[in-house]
Image (cartoon, rainbow, N blue to C red):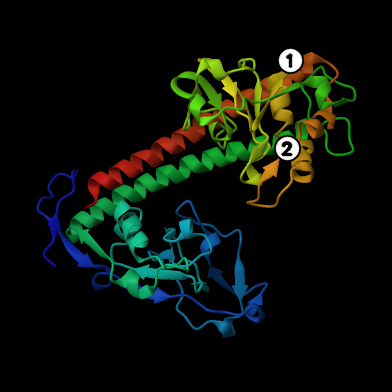
Amino acid sequence: MNKQQEPRLRFKGFTGAWEENVLEEVVNFFSGLTYSPNDVVKNGTLVLRSSNVQDNQITTEDNVFVKESAVNCQNVEVGDVIVVVRNGSRSLIGKHAIIKEKMPNTVIGAFMTGVRSNQPDFLNALLDSYKFNQEIEKNLGATINQITTGAFRKMEFSLPSLPEQTHLGLFFRRLDSQIAESRAVLEKSRQLKKAMLAKMFPANGEKISKIRFKGFEGEWECRKFSDVAELRRGLTYSPLDISPNGIRVLRSSNIDEENYIEKNDDVFVCERAVNIPLVQNGDILITAANGSSRLVGKHAIVQSSMPTVHGGFMLLAKTENPYFLNASMSSSWYLDFIRIFVAGGNGAIGNLSIGDLNEQEILIPKTPEEQTAIGNFFRQLDETIALQSAEVEKLNQLKKGLLAAMLV
Protein backbone atom coordinates (compact mmCIF):
# COMPACT_ATOMS: atom_id res chain seq x y z
CA MET A 1 0.00 0.00 0.00
CA ASN A 2 1.38 3.39 -0.92
CA LYS A 3 -1.61 5.62 -0.28
CA GLN A 4 -0.74 8.11 2.48
CA GLN A 5 -2.67 10.95 4.14
CA GLU A 6 -2.58 13.24 7.16
CA PRO A 7 -5.44 14.36 9.45
CA ARG A 8 -6.38 18.04 9.72
CA LEU A 9 -5.94 18.09 13.51
CA ARG A 10 -3.17 16.34 15.46
CA PHE A 11 -1.66 16.24 18.92
CA LYS A 12 1.52 18.24 19.35
CA GLY A 13 4.68 16.33 18.45
CA PHE A 14 3.16 14.04 15.83
CA THR A 15 3.99 14.62 12.18
CA GLY A 16 4.21 12.66 8.97
CA ALA A 17 1.70 10.87 6.79
CA TRP A 18 -0.56 8.06 7.91
CA GLU A 19 -0.19 4.79 6.05
CA GLU A 20 -2.91 2.67 4.50
CA ASN A 21 -3.33 -0.79 6.07
CA VAL A 22 -5.56 -3.79 5.53
CA LEU A 23 -7.42 -4.34 8.80
CA GLU A 24 -6.52 -8.01 9.19
CA GLU A 25 -2.82 -7.07 9.12
CA VAL A 26 -3.10 -5.08 12.37
CA VAL A 27 -5.90 -6.75 14.36
CA ASN A 28 -7.20 -10.26 15.08
CA PHE A 29 -10.76 -11.41 14.43
CA PHE A 30 -12.81 -14.04 16.22
CA SER A 31 -16.25 -15.42 15.44
CA GLY A 32 -19.38 -15.76 17.53
CA LEU A 33 -21.39 -18.73 18.75
CA THR A 34 -24.07 -20.50 16.76
CA TYR A 35 -26.60 -22.10 19.09
CA SER A 36 -30.10 -23.59 18.95
CA PRO A 37 -33.17 -22.81 21.08
CA ASN A 38 -32.52 -26.09 22.90
CA ASP A 39 -29.20 -24.66 24.14
CA VAL A 40 -30.84 -21.69 25.90
CA VAL A 41 -30.97 -21.90 29.70
CA LYS A 42 -31.75 -19.55 32.58
CA ASN A 43 -28.18 -19.50 33.85
CA GLY A 44 -25.10 -20.39 31.87
CA THR A 45 -22.78 -18.71 29.40
CA LEU A 46 -23.88 -15.18 28.48
CA VAL A 47 -24.17 -14.58 24.74
CA LEU A 48 -23.73 -10.93 23.73
CA ARG A 49 -25.96 -9.99 20.81
CA SER A 50 -26.98 -6.82 18.98
CA SER A 51 -29.42 -5.88 21.76
CA ASN A 52 -26.53 -5.90 24.25
CA VAL A 53 -24.90 -2.99 22.38
CA GLN A 54 -26.61 0.34 23.03
CA ASP A 55 -25.12 3.79 22.38
CA ASN A 56 -21.67 2.21 21.92
CA GLN A 57 -21.86 0.67 25.38
CA ILE A 58 -22.30 -2.91 26.58
CA THR A 59 -25.64 -3.43 28.33
CA THR A 60 -26.80 -6.55 30.12
CA GLU A 61 -30.56 -6.10 30.17
CA ASP A 62 -31.81 -8.31 27.32
CA ASN A 63 -29.66 -11.34 28.07
CA VAL A 64 -29.54 -14.82 26.60
CA PHE A 65 -27.66 -17.66 28.32
CA VAL A 66 -26.71 -21.02 26.85
CA LYS A 67 -25.52 -24.24 28.47
CA GLU A 68 -21.75 -24.50 28.70
CA SER A 69 -21.64 -27.71 26.65
CA ALA A 70 -22.87 -25.74 23.61
CA VAL A 71 -19.98 -23.25 23.73
CA ASN A 72 -17.24 -23.83 21.18
CA CYS A 73 -15.82 -20.32 20.80
CA GLN A 74 -13.56 -18.11 22.87
CA ASN A 75 -14.56 -15.89 25.77
CA VAL A 76 -14.50 -12.11 25.33
CA GLU A 77 -11.63 -10.22 26.94
CA VAL A 78 -11.15 -6.67 28.20
CA GLY A 79 -10.34 -4.49 25.19
CA ASP A 80 -12.22 -6.60 22.63
CA VAL A 81 -14.43 -4.61 20.30
CA ILE A 82 -17.58 -6.51 19.39
CA VAL A 83 -19.33 -5.56 16.14
CA VAL A 84 -22.79 -6.33 14.74
CA VAL A 85 -22.19 -7.84 11.29
CA ARG A 86 -25.67 -9.24 10.54
CA ASN A 87 -29.10 -7.94 11.56
CA GLY A 88 -32.64 -7.59 10.32
CA SER A 89 -32.18 -3.83 10.38
CA ARG A 90 -29.66 -2.53 7.87
CA SER A 91 -28.95 0.55 10.01
CA LEU A 92 -27.61 -1.59 12.88
CA ILE A 93 -24.81 -3.17 10.85
CA GLY A 94 -21.52 -1.92 12.26
CA LYS A 95 -22.90 -1.05 15.69
CA HIS A 96 -20.14 -1.80 18.16
CA ALA A 97 -18.82 -1.48 21.71
CA ILE A 98 -15.63 -2.15 23.61
CA ILE A 99 -15.44 -4.63 26.49
CA LYS A 100 -14.34 -2.42 29.39
CA GLU A 101 -14.30 -4.89 32.27
CA LYS A 102 -13.85 -8.59 32.82
CA MET A 103 -16.88 -10.62 31.71
CA PRO A 104 -16.17 -14.25 32.66
CA ASN A 105 -18.17 -16.95 30.92
CA THR A 106 -19.28 -14.56 28.15
CA VAL A 107 -19.14 -15.02 24.37
CA ILE A 108 -20.58 -13.22 21.35
CA GLY A 109 -23.41 -14.45 19.14
CA ALA A 110 -23.14 -15.69 15.57
CA PHE A 111 -24.28 -12.36 14.11
CA MET A 112 -21.40 -10.58 15.85
CA THR A 113 -17.67 -10.41 15.12
CA GLY A 114 -15.01 -9.79 17.74
CA VAL A 115 -11.93 -7.69 16.97
CA ARG A 116 -8.87 -7.85 19.20
CA SER A 117 -6.14 -5.21 19.02
CA ASN A 118 -3.18 -3.91 21.00
CA GLN A 119 -4.78 -0.45 20.55
CA PRO A 120 -8.42 -1.18 21.44
CA ASP A 121 -9.45 2.41 22.21
CA PHE A 122 -8.09 3.65 18.89
CA LEU A 123 -9.77 0.76 17.07
CA ASN A 124 -13.08 1.60 18.77
CA ALA A 125 -12.75 5.22 17.62
CA LEU A 126 -11.83 4.06 14.11
CA LEU A 127 -15.07 2.09 13.93
CA ASP A 128 -16.96 5.28 14.87
CA SER A 129 -15.52 7.08 11.84
CA TYR A 130 -17.19 8.03 8.57
CA LYS A 131 -14.60 5.88 6.81
CA PHE A 132 -15.93 2.74 8.53
CA ASN A 133 -19.48 3.66 7.51
CA GLN A 134 -18.26 3.98 3.93
CA GLU A 135 -16.64 0.55 4.14
CA ILE A 136 -19.88 -0.93 5.48
CA GLU A 137 -21.93 0.53 2.63
CA LYS A 138 -19.41 -0.75 0.12
CA ASN A 139 -19.45 -4.30 1.52
CA LEU A 140 -23.08 -4.75 2.58
CA GLY A 141 -24.83 -7.72 1.01
CA ALA A 142 -27.34 -6.92 -1.72
CA THR A 143 -30.15 -9.03 -0.23
CA ILE A 144 -28.98 -9.87 3.31
CA ASN A 145 -28.13 -7.18 5.85
CA GLN A 146 -24.59 -8.29 6.64
CA ILE A 147 -20.89 -7.74 6.13
CA THR A 148 -18.98 -10.98 5.82
CA THR A 149 -15.92 -11.68 7.94
CA GLY A 150 -13.89 -11.85 4.74
CA ALA A 151 -14.99 -8.38 3.67
CA PHE A 152 -14.43 -7.03 7.19
CA ARG A 153 -10.89 -8.39 7.25
CA LYS A 154 -10.04 -6.73 3.93
CA MET A 155 -11.24 -3.22 4.85
CA GLU A 156 -8.54 -0.60 4.46
CA PHE A 157 -7.82 2.24 6.88
CA SER A 158 -5.10 4.87 7.22
CA LEU A 159 -3.26 4.46 10.53
CA PRO A 160 -0.67 6.56 12.41
CA SER A 161 2.21 5.29 14.51
CA LEU A 162 1.41 3.26 17.63
CA PRO A 163 2.21 6.16 20.02
CA GLU A 164 -0.20 8.44 18.13
CA GLN A 165 -2.83 5.69 18.15
CA THR A 166 -2.47 5.54 21.94
CA HIS A 167 -3.00 9.30 22.30
CA LEU A 168 -6.01 9.29 19.99
CA GLY A 169 -7.53 6.24 21.65
CA LEU A 170 -7.22 7.75 25.12
CA PHE A 171 -8.70 11.06 23.90
CA PHE A 172 -11.79 9.44 22.40
CA ARG A 173 -12.13 7.08 25.35
CA ARG A 174 -12.40 10.11 27.66
CA LEU A 175 -14.86 11.82 25.31
CA ASP A 176 -16.96 8.64 25.16
CA SER A 177 -16.97 8.52 28.98
CA GLN A 178 -18.20 12.12 29.10
CA ILE A 179 -20.95 11.31 26.60
CA ALA A 180 -21.94 8.20 28.58
CA GLU A 181 -22.11 10.21 31.81
CA SER A 182 -24.32 12.83 30.13
CA ARG A 183 -26.58 10.10 28.79
CA ALA A 184 -26.81 8.56 32.25
CA VAL A 185 -27.89 11.92 33.74
CA LEU A 186 -30.49 12.30 30.98
CA GLU A 187 -31.79 8.76 31.49
CA LYS A 188 -32.07 9.37 35.23
CA SER A 189 -34.26 12.43 34.57
CA ARG A 190 -36.37 10.47 32.10
CA GLN A 191 -36.90 7.73 34.66
CA LEU A 192 -37.80 10.34 37.29
CA LYS A 193 -40.44 11.77 34.97
CA LYS A 194 -41.82 8.30 34.28
CA ALA A 195 -42.02 7.57 38.01
CA MET A 196 -43.64 10.92 38.85
CA LEU A 197 -46.22 10.53 36.08
CA ALA A 198 -47.22 7.22 37.65
CA LYS A 199 -47.49 8.75 41.13
CA MET A 200 -48.92 12.21 40.41
CA PHE A 201 -51.74 10.96 38.18
CA PRO A 202 -54.29 8.45 39.52
CA ALA A 203 -53.74 4.81 38.53
CA ASN A 204 -56.43 2.96 36.56
CA GLY A 205 -59.51 2.48 38.69
CA GLU A 206 -58.48 5.13 41.23
CA LYS A 207 -59.45 8.79 41.66
CA ILE A 208 -56.66 10.02 43.93
CA SER A 209 -52.98 10.24 43.02
CA LYS A 210 -50.31 8.74 45.28
CA ILE A 211 -48.39 12.05 45.53
CA ARG A 212 -49.96 15.50 45.81
CA PHE A 213 -48.76 18.98 46.55
CA LYS A 214 -49.47 20.27 50.03
CA GLY A 215 -52.88 21.83 50.48
CA PHE A 216 -54.73 19.80 47.85
CA GLU A 217 -57.10 16.94 48.67
CA GLY A 218 -60.23 15.18 47.47
CA GLU A 219 -60.99 12.93 44.53
CA TRP A 220 -60.22 13.98 40.97
CA GLU A 221 -63.13 14.56 38.57
CA CYS A 222 -63.91 12.37 35.57
CA ARG A 223 -64.35 14.52 32.44
CA LYS A 224 -64.45 13.96 28.70
CA PHE A 225 -61.42 15.23 26.80
CA SER A 226 -63.73 17.60 24.89
CA ASP A 227 -64.67 19.21 28.24
CA VAL A 228 -61.10 20.30 28.96
CA ALA A 229 -59.75 20.99 25.47
CA GLU A 230 -60.92 22.05 22.04
CA LEU A 231 -59.47 19.93 19.22
CA ARG A 232 -58.84 21.50 15.82
CA ARG A 233 -57.92 19.80 12.57
CA GLY A 234 -54.89 20.98 10.61
CA LEU A 235 -54.25 22.67 7.28
CA THR A 236 -54.48 20.77 4.03
CA TYR A 237 -52.21 22.25 1.39
CA SER A 238 -50.70 21.33 -1.98
CA PRO A 239 -47.08 21.49 -3.20
CA LEU A 240 -48.07 24.64 -5.13
CA ASP A 241 -48.80 26.38 -1.80
CA ILE A 242 -45.25 25.92 -0.48
CA SER A 243 -43.33 29.19 -0.20
CA PRO A 244 -39.91 29.88 1.39
CA ASN A 245 -41.20 33.05 3.06
CA GLY A 246 -44.68 32.16 4.20
CA ILE A 247 -46.48 30.70 7.23
CA ARG A 248 -44.70 27.90 9.07
CA VAL A 249 -46.50 24.53 9.06
CA LEU A 250 -45.89 22.27 12.06
CA ARG A 251 -45.76 18.54 11.26
CA SER A 252 -44.94 15.33 13.10
CA SER A 253 -41.23 15.76 12.34
CA ASN A 254 -41.24 18.98 14.38
CA ILE A 255 -41.89 17.04 17.62
CA ASP A 256 -38.63 15.67 18.99
CA GLU A 257 -38.16 12.66 21.28
CA GLU A 258 -38.41 14.88 24.36
CA ASN A 259 -41.85 16.15 23.28
CA TYR A 260 -40.52 19.56 22.33
CA ILE A 261 -41.17 21.59 19.19
CA GLU A 262 -37.99 22.09 17.21
CA LYS A 263 -36.97 23.40 13.80
CA ASN A 264 -36.66 20.25 11.76
CA ASP A 265 -37.15 20.19 8.00
CA ASP A 266 -39.57 23.13 8.25
CA VAL A 267 -42.22 23.73 5.59
CA PHE A 268 -43.73 27.14 4.85
CA VAL A 269 -46.85 27.95 2.81
CA CYS A 270 -48.06 31.19 1.28
CA GLU A 271 -50.58 33.21 3.29
CA ARG A 272 -53.39 32.77 0.73
CA ALA A 273 -53.37 29.00 1.37
CA VAL A 274 -54.04 29.39 5.10
CA ASN A 275 -57.73 29.02 5.96
CA ILE A 276 -57.47 27.99 9.62
CA PRO A 277 -56.58 30.04 12.74
CA LEU A 278 -52.90 30.46 13.56
CA VAL A 279 -51.40 28.36 16.34
CA GLN A 280 -51.01 30.18 19.67
CA ASN A 281 -48.22 29.59 22.17
CA GLY A 282 -49.50 27.11 24.74
CA ASP A 283 -51.49 25.07 22.23
CA ILE A 284 -50.74 21.33 22.25
CA LEU A 285 -49.69 19.82 18.93
CA ILE A 286 -50.67 16.16 18.41
CA THR A 287 -49.70 13.76 15.62
CA ALA A 288 -52.98 12.33 14.33
CA ALA A 289 -51.75 10.30 11.34
CA ASN A 290 -48.38 8.98 10.26
CA GLY A 291 -46.83 6.34 8.05
CA SER A 292 -45.63 4.66 11.24
CA SER A 293 -48.32 4.03 13.86
CA ARG A 294 -45.79 4.23 16.71
CA LEU A 295 -45.44 7.97 16.02
CA VAL A 296 -49.17 8.65 16.21
CA GLY A 297 -50.21 10.39 19.42
CA LYS A 298 -46.90 12.09 20.17
CA HIS A 299 -47.49 15.62 21.40
CA ALA A 300 -45.79 18.85 22.43
CA ILE A 301 -46.63 22.35 23.62
CA VAL A 302 -46.11 24.97 20.95
CA GLN A 303 -43.71 27.83 21.62
CA SER A 304 -43.12 29.71 18.36
CA SER A 305 -41.97 33.22 17.57
CA MET A 306 -43.28 33.19 14.01
CA PRO A 307 -46.75 32.89 12.39
CA THR A 308 -47.55 29.17 12.48
CA VAL A 309 -50.28 26.69 11.61
CA HIS A 310 -50.48 22.91 12.07
CA GLY A 311 -50.53 20.49 9.17
CA GLY A 312 -53.31 18.24 7.95
CA PHE A 313 -52.03 15.11 9.70
CA MET A 314 -51.96 16.93 13.04
CA LEU A 315 -54.48 17.96 15.69
CA LEU A 316 -54.30 21.00 17.93
CA ALA A 317 -55.63 21.02 21.50
CA LYS A 318 -56.49 24.40 23.04
CA THR A 319 -56.93 24.35 26.82
CA GLU A 320 -56.71 26.61 29.88
CA ASN A 321 -54.01 24.52 31.59
CA PRO A 322 -51.81 23.30 28.73
CA TYR A 323 -48.87 22.12 30.86
CA PHE A 324 -51.18 20.01 33.01
CA LEU A 325 -52.92 18.46 30.01
CA ASN A 326 -49.63 17.89 28.20
CA ALA A 327 -48.30 16.03 31.26
CA SER A 328 -51.56 14.11 31.59
CA MET A 329 -51.12 13.00 27.96
CA SER A 330 -47.86 11.32 28.97
CA SER A 331 -49.58 9.28 31.69
CA SER A 332 -51.14 5.81 31.57
CA TRP A 333 -54.66 6.73 30.39
CA TYR A 334 -53.35 8.34 27.20
CA LEU A 335 -50.84 5.56 26.46
CA ASP A 336 -53.67 3.03 26.84
CA PHE A 337 -55.93 5.13 24.64
CA ILE A 338 -53.33 5.29 21.85
CA ARG A 339 -52.65 1.55 22.10
CA ILE A 340 -56.35 0.69 21.82
CA PHE A 341 -57.68 3.28 19.39
CA VAL A 342 -54.83 3.89 16.95
CA ALA A 343 -55.17 1.52 14.01
CA GLY A 344 -52.24 -0.34 12.52
CA GLY A 345 -49.43 -2.43 13.95
CA ASN A 346 -45.78 -1.54 14.50
CA GLY A 347 -44.50 0.16 11.37
CA ALA A 348 -48.00 0.30 9.83
CA ILE A 349 -50.01 3.41 9.00
CA GLY A 350 -51.75 4.74 12.11
CA ASN A 351 -54.62 7.17 12.60
CA LEU A 352 -56.02 8.97 15.65
CA SER A 353 -59.71 9.88 15.40
CA ILE A 354 -60.68 13.32 16.69
CA GLY A 355 -64.02 11.84 17.73
CA ASP A 356 -62.43 9.04 19.75
CA LEU A 357 -60.15 11.46 21.59
CA ASN A 358 -63.00 13.90 22.29
CA GLU A 359 -65.03 11.10 23.88
CA GLN A 360 -62.16 9.76 25.97
CA GLU A 361 -62.72 10.16 29.72
CA ILE A 362 -59.85 11.55 31.79
CA LEU A 363 -59.35 12.48 35.44
CA ILE A 364 -58.46 16.03 36.45
CA PRO A 365 -58.11 17.77 39.84
CA LYS A 366 -61.15 19.77 40.87
CA THR A 367 -59.25 23.04 41.26
CA PRO A 368 -57.37 24.88 38.50
CA GLU A 369 -54.71 25.70 41.10
CA GLU A 370 -53.76 22.02 41.51
CA GLN A 371 -53.76 21.55 37.75
CA THR A 372 -51.39 24.51 37.45
CA ALA A 373 -49.10 23.20 40.19
CA ILE A 374 -48.83 19.80 38.52
CA GLY A 375 -48.34 21.38 35.11
CA ASN A 376 -45.57 23.65 36.34
CA PHE A 377 -43.78 20.71 37.98
CA PHE A 378 -43.66 18.74 34.75
CA ARG A 379 -42.89 21.87 32.74
CA GLN A 380 -39.72 22.39 34.80
CA LEU A 381 -38.83 18.70 34.56
CA ASP A 382 -39.35 18.73 30.79
CA GLU A 383 -37.14 21.80 30.46
CA THR A 384 -34.41 20.05 32.45
CA ILE A 385 -34.68 16.96 30.25
CA ALA A 386 -34.57 19.10 27.11
CA LEU A 387 -31.39 20.84 28.29
CA GLN A 388 -29.77 17.52 29.16
CA SER A 389 -30.78 16.07 25.81
CA ALA A 390 -29.27 19.08 24.05
CA GLU A 391 -26.02 18.55 25.98
CA VAL A 392 -25.83 14.93 24.82
CA GLU A 393 -26.47 16.00 21.24
CA LYS A 394 -23.82 18.73 21.53
CA LEU A 395 -21.23 16.20 22.71
CA ASN A 396 -22.22 13.76 19.95
CA GLN A 397 -21.76 16.47 17.33
CA LEU A 398 -18.42 17.44 18.89
CA LYS A 399 -17.27 13.83 18.66
CA LYS A 400 -18.45 13.58 15.07
CA GLY A 401 -16.49 16.69 14.13
CA LEU A 402 -13.35 15.57 15.97
CA LEU A 403 -13.46 12.11 14.36
CA ALA A 404 -13.56 13.78 10.96
CA ALA A 405 -10.68 16.12 11.84
CA MET A 406 -8.41 13.74 13.78
CA LEU A 407 -8.79 10.53 11.74
CA VAL A 408 -8.02 10.04 8.08
Between 1 and 27, the one lying in front of the other is 1
Between the residue at mark 2 and the residue at mark 1, the CA separation in whole angstroms equals 23 Å
Question: The residue under label 1 is which amino acid type?
Answer: Glu
Provide the secondary structure element on which disc 1 rests: loop
When the figure is inspected, residue 169 is found, relative to residue 365, above or below; the finding is below
Residue 394, percent from left and from top: 40, 35
Crowd band around label 1 with a 10 angstrom C-alpha radius: few (<14), some (14–19), many (20+): some
Whether residue 210 appears in this view of the structure is no
List the residue tagged with mark 1.
320
In the picture, measured across the screen, residue 103 lies left or right of residue 329, that is left
Specify the quadrant of the image occupied by residue 367.
top right
Between 208 and 358, the one lying in front of the other is 358
Mark earlier in primary sequence (2, 1): 1
Between 39 and 330, the one lying in front of the other is 330
Label tally: 2
Specify the quadrant of the image occupied by residue 304.
top right
Provide the secondary structure element on which disc 2 rests: loop
Whether residue 15 appears in this view of the structure is yes
Residue most extreme to the front: 240
Residue displayed at 61% across by 38% down: 190
List the residue tagged with mark 2.
352
Crowd band around label 2 with a 10 angstrom C-alpha radius: few (<14), some (14–19), many (20+): many
Specify the quadrant of the image occupied by residue 123.
bottom left
| Quadrant, the N terminus | bottom left
Residue displayed at 22% across by 52% down: 408
When the figure is inspected, residue 223 is found, relative to residue 148, above or below; the finding is above
Residue 200, percent from left and from top: 76, 30
Question: The residue under label 2 is which amino acid type?
Answer: Leu
In the picture, measured across the screen, residue 281 lies left or right of residue 159, that is right
Residue displayed at 61% across by 15% down: 278
Residue displayed at 83% across by 21% down: 227
Residue 372, percent from left and from top: 73, 17
